[in-house]
Image (cartoon, grey):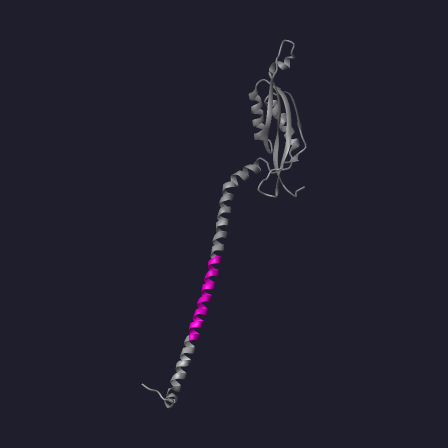
Amino acid sequence: MIFSTADLRYLKRSLCGLACGLTLSGSAIWLGNSHLDHAHEQLHDAQMRLDKAKQALAVAQNDSANLTRYASEYSSIQERKIITEEQRLSWMEDIKRLERRHHLSGLKYTIAPQRSLPLKTGSTDIEIRLSELSLQANLLHEMRLIDFFRDVHAESAGNFIIERCSLERINLDETSPPEDIRTSLKVDCIGGWITLKYRGTP
């Protein structure tokens, strides 16, 4: 089929309609792609928020599990007054009481001024402190010393520890005083009470 210039005027309306149709189609495709890109961005943002929410939930669940796991241990620490001020007077009374219970002879001791220990606790808010004990005594056998320290650990405030002990056997003879007959060992021990304190408290 051959079109002449004269025929164009008959096709002008159709051509205009076709051009408008192509323009509208192109606009629709562009708008569709634009909406699709925006939807992808929204989906990506929603996925990121969901991932953050999952991470926050996992942290919360882990914290909850840790609280449950350590609740009994923290309760025990509170009951034993490990998070506390120095209990010097109470410790002196405990030593006197347990000295009589376990029949220690010639007991002498000193409690050094409390000092901070350069140990990491995992928290910058808690300070570890040591009140060092130096103790000398005479006793009949070493089990009395073991029982004495066991009760100090169990019944006094703070966490009582023993760093070292030296034992020396006493040679008794008929010239020894009567009270020495009940003793055969001389002990010299270093230990102390560890307590925790929140920094910033007086």
Judge whether 130 appears above or below 23 on screen: above
In the picture, which quadrant includes the N terminus? Answer: bottom left
Q: Name the residue furthest top.
A: 174
Taking the spot 58% from the left edge, 25% from the top edge, the residue there is: 148
Examine the residues drawn in magenta and state their main secondary structure.
helix
- Which percent across, then down, holds residue 101? 59, 23
| 112 horizontally vs 66: left or right | right
| 153 horizontally vs 50: left or right | right
Judge whether 39 appears above or below 175 on screen: below
- Which percent across, then down, holds residue 144? 57, 21
Q: Is residue 87 magenta?
A: no
Taking the spot 45% from the left edge, 62% from the top edge, the residue there is: 43
Q: Is residue 36 magenta?
A: yes
In the image, 93 versus 171, the foreground residue is 171
Toward which corner of the image does residue 122 lie, by quadrant?
Answer: top right
User: The magenta stretch spans which residues?
Assistant: 26-49
